[in-house]
Image: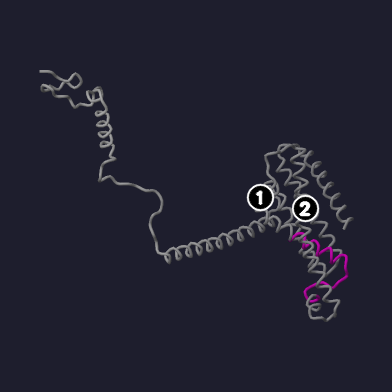
Amino acid sequence: MRSCIYCGRELAPGEKCSCRQSAQHRPGGEPQQEQKKTENTYSGYNDPNRTEYRTGYTKKDNIFTRMREKARARSNAKQNSRVNVKYEGRRFWQTVLEAIRSPIDNVRNPSMLKLVQMLLLWAVQGALAWLCIFFILSHAARGPFAMLANLLAFHGVAGYQTVGYVLLSLLSGAVAGVVGFFLYTGVLYGINRLLLRDKMTRYEEFCQRLAFTAVPFSIIALVGSLLSLISITTLIVLLCCGAAIFVVLTYEALRTQWSGINANRVIYMMMLGFFVIATVAGYVIRLS
């Protein structure tokens, strides 16, 4: 009795072994087709109970359900945005109060502000500074009672003109404060980038310390505008003190920013920056 040379199974006379090895070596195309059929059967392609999985969202919701879900999502987004705005506003005012209490510490380790918030600080400073300059250069009546009298037309058209000049001074001062911010920070950032070769610090990051130098001057200008009721000389002295504090805070901010260089070099760099700023501002005033 003969047997299969591959699997060893005994075969009857004329019988062909059906094992895979003998089917592969048998001449003709039938075994290969049987092999493919067997492989497909084992791989599950011909299994009628096989479960098919599809990707994507195939659930069909009602149109009113989708509209309700979209409206709910928009409402939640608006509520979250209001909460974020309130939190940002509270955090901003806390930062300003901290800058008033500890100006030196605040310029050394400032809280991170957005560019819009920094521009707001400088706009307030410019508006108050322009108001003080208006009170110094003009002899208009100052104080809440004088402004109320002007609004009630006790002084006629001249009273309304005074109120208009005050509002115009505040508006033009706010614009000048924003322009001054870009001039002030831009010149010092140019020194940092060109002379000190600092290419790692971004502009907005460099402005964080310099933005807080405006806070003490703004408070002094506000107090000076109120004390100008007593004497214009008092207002001028307070503005000079505010300018001195501004220079000191600028030095502290640059000293911390440029901590890797000598302090003597820092003060000369600051003087160079103020020279360029004053020159540009002088040319702008002359052209206007």
Residue 167 x/y as whole percent: 78, 69
Residue at the image position 26 percent from the left and 36 percent from the top: 42
Mark number, residue 110 = 1
Quadrant of the rendering where the N terminus is positioned: top left
Q: Is residue 132 above or below residue 22?
A: below
- The three-letter code of the residue at mark 1 reads Pro
Task: Classify residue 6 by image quadrant.
Answer: top left
Q: Is residue 200 left or right of residue 170?
A: left
Q: Residues within 10 Å of mark 2 (few under 14, many from 20)?
A: some
Q: Position of residue 198 (x, y in %)?
A: 71, 38
Left or right: 26 with respect to 126? left
Main SS of the magenta segment?
helix
Query: Which image quarter: residue 121?
Result: bottom right
Q: Which residue is mark 2?
A: 246
**14 or 228: nearer the eye?**
14
Quadrant where the C terminus is found in the figure: bottom right
Element type at mark 1: loop
Q: What residue do we see at 80% from left, 53% from top?
A: 244
Q: In the rendered structure, find residue 227 and report the number of the disc placed on it.
A: none
Seen in the image, is 40 located left or right of residue 72? left
- Viewed as shown, does residue 55 lie left or right of 221? left
Q: The disc labelled 2 sits on which kind of residue?
A: Phe
Where residue 217 sits, quadrant-wise, is bottom right
Q: Earlier in the sequence, mark 2 or mark 1?
A: 1
Q: CA distance from mark 2 to mark 1?
A: 16 Å
Residue sitting farthest toward the right: 286
What residue span does the magenta drawing correspond to?
Answer: 124-146
Residue 137 is covered by the magenta coloring: yes
Residue 167 falls within the magenta-colored stretch: no
In percent of width and height, residue 280 lies at 84, 50
Assess disc 1: are there few (<14), some (14-19) or many (≥20) residues with their C-alpha within 10 Å of its C-alpha. some
- Residue 222: percent from the left, percent from the top? 76, 64
